[in-house]
């Protein structure tokens, strides 16, 4: 996992802020304008425009409208999309969720903040049960391969608290596709895995959870290289954000064209997977054998 990041202030960028700033930067460059011209239109300083384009500060709606007008990109669809993105970014920066005080959230804190305001998460997993679907015992056994006892318990608590989104007032829509290998790997031993598979079956009964199994027999597929999460938002025109979490680093895919490629890969892999009903039957049979 990547190290802790500060969470707010004028020296901090966010995934959504970088996305919004990058859009405005490309619009300015497409018009052949300098930051000084943007600053003049906003009655602001050049350093402020630079911070906006790098996602270091939250953006006000009037500033976005003014820049869109300056760049001659003030059609309703473009302005509405950028305003929606700015609203999400401001909500994320103001968020006082429990994760802000979680002592071991680290780089995962920004992902949890996005997950908290998301409407849908698509998850592809090669070798692990998705975090939103793990039992405490499975998570404890899994984390034991990397962390000491204190860090394990803090991380398990974070995973369990994230799962409240599955059944709360704003139930998160989750579409998870899991490779067969993740279901067969005996993390924590047979009893832990039986209970874990049982929890997966329970989750399939939730109307907001879609779980599919990609069997070995599916052969080659577009998602062979790495696991990832695609985070989507309810606001019209809001861009999807793709999250890839490695051993030593976290990667955010923020460009609309790139995130579209991940969506296409996910959809194609889901199409090669067992149907939700057949997946539930597969998990149930595997649980009885474990």
Image (cartoon, rainbow, N blue to C red):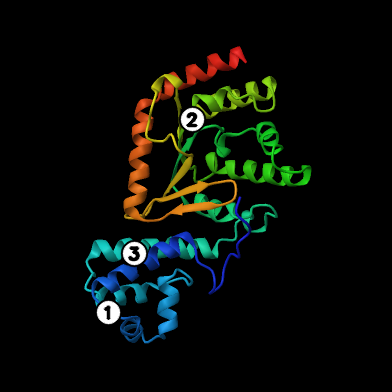
Residue 107 in which image quadrant: bottom right
Q: Nearer the viewer, mark 2 or mark 3?
A: 2
Query: Which mark, by number, is residue 178?
Result: 2
Distance from Cα at disc 2 to Cα at disc 3: 34 Å
Q: Residue 159 in the image: state x and y as whole percent.
A: 63, 42
- 15 lies above or below 55: above
Query: Which mark, by number, is residue 15?
Result: none
Q: Circle 1 sits on which residue?
A: 33
Q: Nearer the viewer, mark 1 or mark 2?
A: 1
Q: Residue at x 41, y 36 (%)?
A: 223
- 87 lies above or below 38: above
Residues at discs 1 and 2 in contact (Cβ within 8 Å): no
Q: Camera-side residue: 265 or 209?
A: 265
Q: Is residue 181 left or right of residue 64?
A: right
Q: Residues within 10 Å of mark 2 (few under 14, many from 20)?
A: many
Residue 64 in which image quadrant: bottom left
Q: Circle 3 sits on which residue?
A: 82
Q: Camera-side residue: 7 or 203?
A: 7
């Amino acid at each position: 996992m990547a190290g802790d990041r500060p969470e707010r202030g004028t020296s901090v960028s966010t995934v959504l802020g970088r996305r919004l700033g990058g859009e405005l930067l490309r619009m300015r460059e497409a018009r052949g304008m300098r930051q000084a011209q943007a600053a003049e239109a906003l009655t602001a300083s050049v350093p402020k425009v630079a911070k906006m384009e790098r996602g270091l500060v939250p953006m006000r709606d009037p500033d976005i409208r003014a820049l869109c007008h300056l760049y001659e990109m003030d059609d309703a669809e473009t302005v509405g999309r950028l305003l929606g993105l700015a609203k999400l970014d401001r909500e994320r920066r103001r968020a006082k969720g429990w994760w802000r005080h979680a002592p071991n959230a680290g780089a995962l804190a920004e992902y949890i903040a996005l997950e908290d305001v998301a409407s849908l998460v698509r998850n592809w997993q090669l070798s692990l049960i998705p975090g939103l679907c793990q039992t405490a015992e499975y998570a404890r056994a899994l984390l034991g391969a990397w962390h000491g006892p204190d860090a394990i318990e803090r991380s398990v608590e974070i995973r369990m608290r994230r799962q409240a989104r599955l059944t709360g007032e704003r139930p998160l829509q989750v579409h998870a596709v899991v490779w067969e290998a993740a279901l067969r790997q005996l993390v924590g031993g047979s009893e832990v895995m039986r209970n874990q598979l049982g929890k997966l079956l329970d989750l399939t009964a939730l109307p907001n959870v879609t779980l599919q199994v990609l069997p070995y027999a599916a052969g080659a597929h577009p998602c062979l290289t790495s696991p990832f999460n695609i985070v989507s938002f309810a606001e019209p025109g809001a861009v999807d954000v793709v999250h890839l979490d490695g051993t030593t680093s976290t990667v955010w895919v923020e460009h609309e064209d790139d995130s579209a490629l991940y969506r296409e890969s996910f959809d194609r892999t889901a199409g090669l997977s067992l149907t939700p009903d057949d997946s539930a039957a597969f998990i149930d049979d595997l649980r009885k054998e474990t």
